[in-house]
Image (spheres, grey):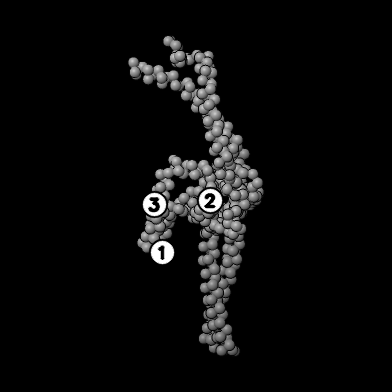
């Protein structure tokens, strides 16, 4: 029996909804079959996807400087606008720059060296870089194996030849690259680990409350907590270094000047004392003039020395005052529940995809058949 093609009636751009429902009802077995296939595919992906845990902390960025925006910034925060994140004041770093720090190569290279303990290391600490590069630490995943030898087969073949090429290029770069250059070089293996770590870092900033959520996603809960804790420490170090860089340079200059002034003062003091010991009971005008000059040089040197000593102490205090603090509101906790995969959501999504795909196919198939029939005629 020839299937009925649902086409708009002459003079009308509408399709009868009743005919659509009838056509879908006639093809209900096909729709159920396709939906069942998608359901099985969703179940397979949900139960073969690697389990991951996310450990995170809640941080409040603080510094001792006053908010330059004043009441205007407070009023803006009430309506959900954070004017402070878009402003870079002298010597300070905005929270809007934090994601750039977290995604930078020097920062992630530091995270690569984070010591972690995983099940396959037998209680021994290894670096995060070792975990991602050594095969013995990798979990066998059915879904990844299927992907690797199907749609990922070309990439697998290319990687075999790329390994030896990377080693050769690394040796060449070491030979031709000067030691004093600031140019950063990275191998393909480092790039792969860099991408994985960058994709596993979880960062979120609540502009209204002014807090940061910083975490890391990893296949094992304790190691996830270890890396998350290191993320907080490294970020705080980067922010402190940026904030106090100019103050530290000023402190170094003042301390150097103080050391020179102290040396000069001790020299002048010794000269005055030596002259007084050698010329006790002075009665000549020349002797009194010389002593007056030496005492004047001594007093000037002492004044400079004393002022620089005060300035050194003040600069040291300013270093402490200018040092920003990332206050931990909620510390890192070893997660008990996995963050991925969400098996229920995966199954529901694939089931809905199956229904939608089967429905669309049932509705558009008659149109394609009509076109093919017209072409043949």
Q: Residue at x 50, y 55 (%)?
A: 134
The spot of residue 226 in percent (x, y) is: 60, 54
The spot of residue 284 in percent (x, y) is: 54, 88
Residue 225, which numbered label? none
Residue 371 figure quarter:
top left
Question: CB of mark 1 within 8 Å of CB of mark 3?
Answer: no
Q: Quadrant of the C terminus?
A: top left
Q: What is the secondary structure assignment of the residue under circle 1? A: loop
Q: What is the secondary structure assignment of the residue under circle 3? A: helix
Q: Nearer the viewer, mark 1 or mark 3?
A: 3
The spot of residue 187 in percent (x, y) is: 43, 54
Question: CB of mark 1 within 8 Å of CB of mark 2?
Answer: no
Q: Earlier in the sequence, mark 1 or mark 3?
A: 3
The number of numbered discs placed on residues in the rendered structure image is: 3
Kindly give the residue lying farthest to the front in the view shown. 1
Front position in the image: 310 or 283: 310
Q: What is the secondary structure assignment of the residue under circle 2? A: loop
Front position in the image: 316 or 199: 199
Q: Is residue 370 left or right of residue 225?
A: left
Front position in the image: 78 or 96: 96
Residue that carries the numbered disc 1 in the rendered image:
179
Q: Quadrant of the N terminus?
A: top left
Q: Residue at x 54, y 49 (%)?
A: 139
Residue that carries the numbered disc 3 in the rendered image:
161
Q: Earlier in the sequence, mark 1 or mark 2?
A: 2
Residue that carries the numbered disc 2 in the rendered image:
138
Q: Is residue 112 above or below residue 307?
A: above
Q: For label 3, count other residues whose C-alpha is less than 10 Å away and answer few (under 14), some (14-19) or many (20+).
A: few
């Amino acid at each position: 029996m020839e299937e009925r093609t649902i086409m708009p009636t002459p003079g009308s751009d509408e399709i009868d909804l009743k005919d659509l429902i009838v056509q879908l009802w006639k093809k209900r077995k096909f729709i159920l079959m396709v939906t069942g296939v998608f359901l099985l595919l969703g179940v397979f992906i949900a139960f073969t996807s690697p389990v991951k845990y996310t450990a995170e902390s809640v941080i409040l960025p603080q510094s001792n400087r006053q908010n330059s925006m004043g009441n205007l910034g407070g009023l803006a925060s009430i309506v959900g606008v954070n004017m402070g994140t878009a402003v870079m004041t002298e010597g300070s770093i905005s929270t809007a720059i934090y994601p750039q720090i977290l995604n930078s190569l020097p920062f992630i290279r530091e995270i690569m060296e984070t010591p972690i303990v995983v099940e396959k290391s037998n209680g021994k600490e290894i670096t995060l870089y070792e975990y991602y590069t050594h095969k013995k630490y990798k979990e066998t995943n059915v879904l990844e194996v299927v992907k690797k030898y199907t749609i990922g087969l070309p990439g697998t073949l290319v990687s075999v030849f790329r390994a030896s090429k990377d080693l050769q290029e690394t040796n060449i770069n070491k030979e031709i690259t000067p030691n004093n250059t600031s140019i950063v070089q990275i191998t393909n293996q480092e790039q792969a680990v860099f991408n994985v770590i960058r994709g596993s870092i979880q960062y979120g900033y609540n502009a209204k409350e002014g807090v940061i959520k910083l975490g890391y996603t990893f296949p094992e809960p304790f190691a996830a907590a270890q890396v998350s804790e290191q993320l907080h420490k490294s970020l705080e170090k980067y922010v402190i270094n940026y904030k106090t860089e100019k103050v530290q340079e000023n402190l170094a200059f003042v301390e150097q000047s103080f050391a020179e002034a102290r040396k000069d003062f001790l020299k002048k003091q010794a000269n005055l004392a030596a002259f007084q010991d050698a010329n006790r009971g002075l009665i000549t005008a020349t002797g009194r003039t010389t002593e007056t000059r030496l005492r004047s040089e001594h007093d000037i040197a002492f004044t400079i020395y004393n002022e620089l000593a005060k300035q050194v102490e003040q600069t040291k205090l300013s270093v402490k005052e200018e040092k920003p603090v990332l206050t931990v509101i909620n510390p890192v906790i070893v997660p008990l529940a996995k963050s991925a995969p969400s098996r229920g959501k995966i199954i529901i999504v694939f089931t809905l995809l199956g229904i939608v795909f089967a429905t669309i196919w049932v509705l558009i198939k008659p149109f394609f058949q009509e076109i093919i029939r017209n072409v043949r005629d």
